[in-house]
Image: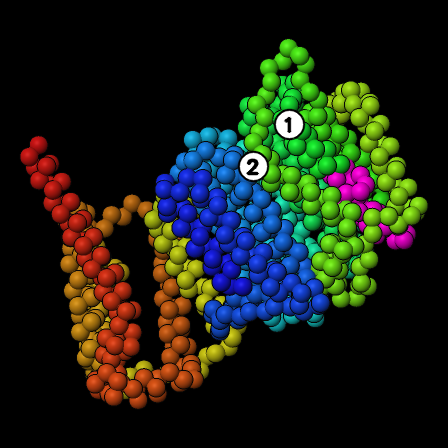
Amino acid sequence: MIWLVALHALVGLGILAAARYLGRWAFALGAVPMLAALGFVGRHGADVLDGGAVTETSAWVGRLDLAFDMRLDGFGLLMLLIISGIGVAVMAYGTSYFSASAANARIAGLLVLFSGSMVGLVLADNLLVLYMFWELTSITSWLLIGSDSTDARARAGALHALMVTGAGGLVMLGGLVVLGQEAGTYSLSAILADPPTGGAVGVGLALVVVGIITKSAQYPFHSWLPGAMVAPTPVSAYLHSATMVKAGIYLAARLAPAFALVGGWRPALIVIGLVTMIAGGLRALRQHDLKLLLAMGTISQLGFLLVLVGTGEPEATTAGCLLLLAHALFKAALFLVVGIVDHEAGTRDLRELAGFGPGWGPVKVVTVVAAASMAGLPPLLGFVAKESAYEAFVHEGAWGAAVIAGLVAGSALTVAYSVRFAATVLPSPPGDAPAVHAPGRWFVAPAVALAGLTVLGGLFVSTLIEPVVDAATLVLDPSADHVHLALWHGFNVPLVLSLVTYGLGILLVVGREPFARAQAALAPSFSGDDGFAATLRGLSIAAARTTRVVQSGSLPVYAAVILLTAVLVPGAALILNGSWSGWPRFAETPLQALLAAIIISAAVAASVVKRRFAAVVLLGAVGYGMGLVFVVQGAPDLALTQFAVETLSIVVFMLVLRRLPARFEQRRPAIATWLRVLVASTVAVGVFFFALISAGVQLPRTVSPGLIERSLPDAGGGNVVNVVLVDFRGLDTLGEISVLVVAGVGAVALARAGRARSTEEAGE
């Protein structure tokens, strides 16, 4: 499975690199890894549908329990079918939709990279690996939405999507870490098999919910999805109807059966989902752009899905899996229809479309079938999914009745905007209207295939769909019974609810004008885009005010904050741990006492002298004194290093002092002097005790004996310190030398700049 993700990455990056040479062939090449994923499903599908799972592990960072743990089970198989199946259709569609250009070929490469990110997400069995792929979908989506960098709307839409989904992902990461720590493992399958409990788990789940609802465009974080519709239609068909927005639904479905009763998981997701479903449906009825109509309809359907998979009940989980597949098929087909209309007619505004004449028959058939499935009409797959959703809440008491009422209201709105969409494409143009060029058969073929699967899925649901949905449901909720799907269950409560839904939908269509006026009058003036803009303005204001406080421009203040933080934070940890081992001996020999006296005297003198040159010399004396201590203690190599560093430091100081007054200026008030004394004293005391405590800590010698034993035979050196620096950690030493070289070059550059400026001033 890792090879499958790697294949997507290799092909996607290859297309990006060779974009100028590939043209439309980029989309054909991009379909290869998606077909490979379908082949992988075909190879292991029988075992997975029988209740098995395919697992694969590749170690990453063992000490941190990080590994590429991949797992294909029943639910992963369903998601993989959607991701790769819709992906192949979109790639085939792209060969007709896009012209042959390097920019369009790059879109194909980005689509492949996005597909690989989604494949990795649904196959990941490690929470941190899942999060990595989660963020990769956000990044590749940002690149796809903003693929036309010259379009300001594309840049704004891409940034909006990235900020909302990225911020939600960061919050979710905190929740995943909490879950992993409480469970003692980051394995997703292990956590679901033995869910952790406790208050921290509830907090972690709340953070995860934030990531779920931002990714799946739930209210109030929905506004990024309509803005993303500025992307090319194939991108919208793939990312924002079938795959990316399903990432949040996928994670909710994974976690809900195990955690639905923890904290406020179930009521929160049900309320958010119902609000999103109804509000999205109302917004869909107000749109004149066919693509935005589908975008708001997608938001509504995502709310429907969140209610089903977030409930955590077996029947609702089954309905959620079924609707997940049905929605991918009919919504992708409708997006492809919009692309065809826009490509041939030059507009998506339903007020400007006068009808379509000869040659548009296949497009009209696809529109009717896909819109009818979206509305939940028999004998299509959308009807079976809606009936299953109603059935899931019929026997759940009062709260089930409340959920059904919300689902019926949202589904009635779905019927109304489905009819509105179909009514735009079905009519023929009047006799005096110019005929719209009919699309080619290969242009329409992918949409026909998706619509055909919607029909076949409804007619043969027990044969084609039931095994996949059954395997997915049993993986998500092992306590569930085997699924039995059928197109017709007789005259029952769900059928009555469906008839009520159709009736309400027809009433909305018939009374669309007064309903539109009432909706316009009652619609809030504050939209999701306004909320996003207000949030950005608030962040900018808060950042500016915070910067004025913490970035005062005072170097002493910055130094005080840095030094106090560096001392007080570890100092507090040392005090709490109680690791004091007692006072050490002041000196072992009279020579050590003499050197200590010299160092202390030079340090005190450096702090009280008035001339800068004298202070630098005294600081150098402190450093050279430490070098003599190293000599006395038998470490001549450290002494040489200390002497070299002190010499270089004094030279740099002198170069800087050339540009400064000879004396320290005393223009600060007395209170400032005492504050500096307080900071300096705190740092001195902290460093002093930190050194004493650190020297008294005895760490297990797990590495040192091995280095000593290997020093002579492996490196031919008797001085283990030199061997470590030159052989065992040679690259670290090279890096340190590079830092010193860069610092030296910088010092020389500053000195030369100062000399040049002095020369110019003298010349003037």
Q: Which residues are magenta?
A: 373-400
Q: Residue at label 2? A: 442
Q: Residues within 10 Å of mark 2 (few under 14, many from 20)?
A: few
Q: Nearer the viewer, residue 554 or 754?
A: 754
Instruction: Reply above or below: 412 against 674.
Output: above
Indicate the amino acid at tag 1.
Answer: Trp
Q: Is residue 382 magenta?
A: yes
Q: Nearer the viewer, residue 248 or 344?
A: 344
Using residue 177 as the reference point, say whether residue 598 is left or right of it: left
- Asked if residue 582 shows in the view, the reply is no
Q: Residue at x 53, y 70 (%)?
A: 57
**Residue 610, located in which quarter of the rendered image?**
bottom left
Q: Residues within 10 Å of mark 1 (few under 14, many from 20)?
A: many
| Label 2 SS | helix
Location of residue 534 in the rendering, given as x and y in whole percent from the top left corner? 58, 34
Badge 1 or badge 2: first in the primary sequence: 1
Location of residue 17 in the rendering, given as x and y in whole percent from the top left corner? 37, 47
Residue, far right: 491
Q: Nearer the viewer, residue 317 or 631?
A: 317
| Label 1 SS | loop
**Residue 690, located in which quarter of the rendered image?**
bottom left
Location of residue 528 in the rendering, given as x and y in whole percent from the top left corner? 63, 34
Location of residue 226 in the rendering, given as x and y in whole percent from the top left corner? 61, 34
**Which mark, residue 723?**
none
Task: Quadrant for the N terminus, please.
Answer: bottom right
Using residue 764 as the reference point, say whether residue 720 is left or right of it: right
Indicate the amino acid at tag 2.
Answer: Trp
Would you say the magenta stretch is mainly helix, strand or loop?
helix
Task: Quadrant for the C terminus, please.
Answer: top left
**Residue 350, located in which quarter of the rendered image?**
top right
Q: Residue at label 1? A: 360
Q: Residue at x 34, y 86 (%)?
A: 706
